[in-house]
């Protein structure tokens, strides 16, 4: 069983500080939904509110169509995995997994049967008698997931559960988490500040900033069609060049910048003279015969990509990422080049004037 979650115009205040501002989200049952944003943006506050550890100041939270007002955390159809996992070191793996069932009065035999089933589900068969101290970081993550699933929640809430792992293990666990979610079919709400986690695992992503949701969409939409300058800057690397809008036609906008007249897709809300920023991803810039004049300042080889730092004639810093087939090896610091891009690969968004 999975459940829809409706967050309806919710605000959370702590004294004069507003942690969450008029947030409305509909999360579909069985969806892997991530809330992405920097530290302090309100994403964990939102999760605690769904889990029942915090009440909204205004608005409502509904799970499976039922208003959660007055329903405590232990009575909600949710399970929460904390950042520190909170496993019990003096209990075996099976005892950790069965703890929630023990609280509910399940027999020792039933707890062990359920633990063994879940260990097979999270790819840890036969490890029920091991101590927590004998497990690796990734194995501990899986035990925490199994323990949460033991009580058969309709919604699993995960608060940055991979943040303490090294890069290779985080990347491996992304795939594991997604596979587990697809096997069990319940709703996952995943909190992270890591854009890679959000984009690779999620059906949809909500990007938060200063307590508000700036955009909701699938990973490709968030990356390729950011709705606001914050989303464009926070999700992935981006080059931003500002200037007033010169003209808008056929879905494209031209802006006057220190680098010349630049063109990109119209992000909406623009008019002639409006302050705007053109965003272009580093991987969309290419060396060209004519274009933006720049000098190579540095290069960084990363196997499949070479990252090239550029300084335009006006001093503006640009970043370009090139695959091995594009001759990045020939670019050395001090080289004078021109770079260009396809206007369809850039987006122009209105900025504060």
Image: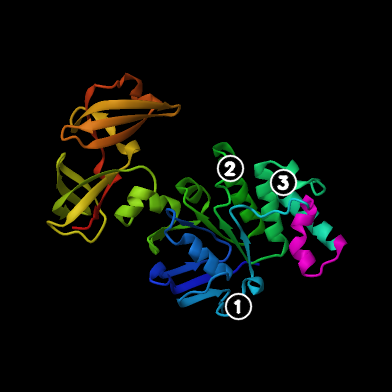
Name the residue: 51% across, 54% down. 202
Name the residue: 63% across, 60% down. 185
Q: Quadrant of residue 66?
A: bottom right
**The magenta stretch spans which residues?**
91-109
Cα distance in 3D space between marks 3 and 2: 18 Å
- Which marked residue is nearer to the observer: mark 3 or mark 2? 2
Q: Secondary structure at mark 3?
A: loop
User: Earlier along the polypeptide chain: callout 3 or callout 1?
Assistant: 1
Disc 2 target residue = 165
Name the residue: 21% across, 37% down. 316
User: Earlier along the polypeptide chain: callout 2 or callout 1?
Assistant: 1
Tag shown at residue 71: 1
**Residue 141 at x, y percent in the picture:** 65, 49
Above/below status of 127 relative to 8: above
Tag shown at residue 123: 3
Q: How many other residues sit within 10 Å of disc 1, few (<14), some (14-19) or many (≥20)?
A: some
């Amino acid at each position: 069983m999975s459940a829809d979650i409706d967050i309806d115009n919710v605000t959370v205040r702590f004294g004069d500080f507003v942690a969450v501002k008029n947030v409305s989200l509909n999360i579909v049952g069985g969806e892997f939904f991530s809330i992405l944003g920097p530290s302090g943006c309100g994403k964990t506050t939102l999760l605690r509110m769904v889990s029942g550890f915090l009440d909204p100041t205004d608005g409502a939270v509904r799970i499976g169509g039922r208003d959660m007002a007055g329903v405590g955390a232990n009575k909600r159809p949710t399970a929460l995995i904390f950042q520190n996992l909170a496993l019990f070191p003096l209990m075996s793996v099976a005892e950790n997994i069965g703890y929630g069932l023990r609280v509910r009065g399940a027999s020792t035999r039933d707890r062990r049967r359920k633990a063994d089933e879940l260990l097979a589900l999270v790819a840890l068969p036969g490890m029920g008698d091991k101590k927590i101290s004998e497990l690796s970081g990734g194995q501990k993550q899986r035990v925490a997931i199994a323990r949460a699933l033991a009580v058969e929640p309709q919604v699993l809430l995960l608060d940055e559960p991979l943040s303490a792992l090294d890069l290779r293990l985080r990347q491996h666990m992304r795939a594991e988490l997604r596979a587990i979610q697809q096997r069990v079919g319940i709703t996952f709400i995943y909190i992270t500040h890591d854009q890679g986690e959000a984009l690779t695992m999620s059906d949809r992503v909500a990007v938060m900033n200063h307590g508000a949701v700036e955009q909701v969409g699938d990973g490709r939409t968030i990356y390729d069609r950011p709705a606001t300058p914050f989303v464009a800057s926070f999700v992935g690397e981006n080059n931003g060049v500002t200037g007033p809008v010169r003209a808008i036609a056929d879905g494209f906008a031209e802006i006057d910048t220190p680098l010349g007249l630049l063109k990109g897709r119209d992000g909406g809300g623009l008019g002639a003279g409006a302050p705007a920023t053109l965003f272009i991803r580093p991987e969309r810039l290419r060396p060209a015969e004519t274009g933006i004049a720049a000098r190579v300042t540095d290069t960084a080889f990363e196997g499949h990509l070479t990252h090239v730092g550029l300084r335009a004639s006006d001093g503006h810093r640009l970043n370009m990422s090139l695959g091995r087939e594009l001759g990045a090896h020939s670019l050395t610091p001090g080289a004078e080049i021109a770079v260009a891009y396809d206007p369809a690969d850039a987006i122009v968004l209105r900025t504060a004037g």
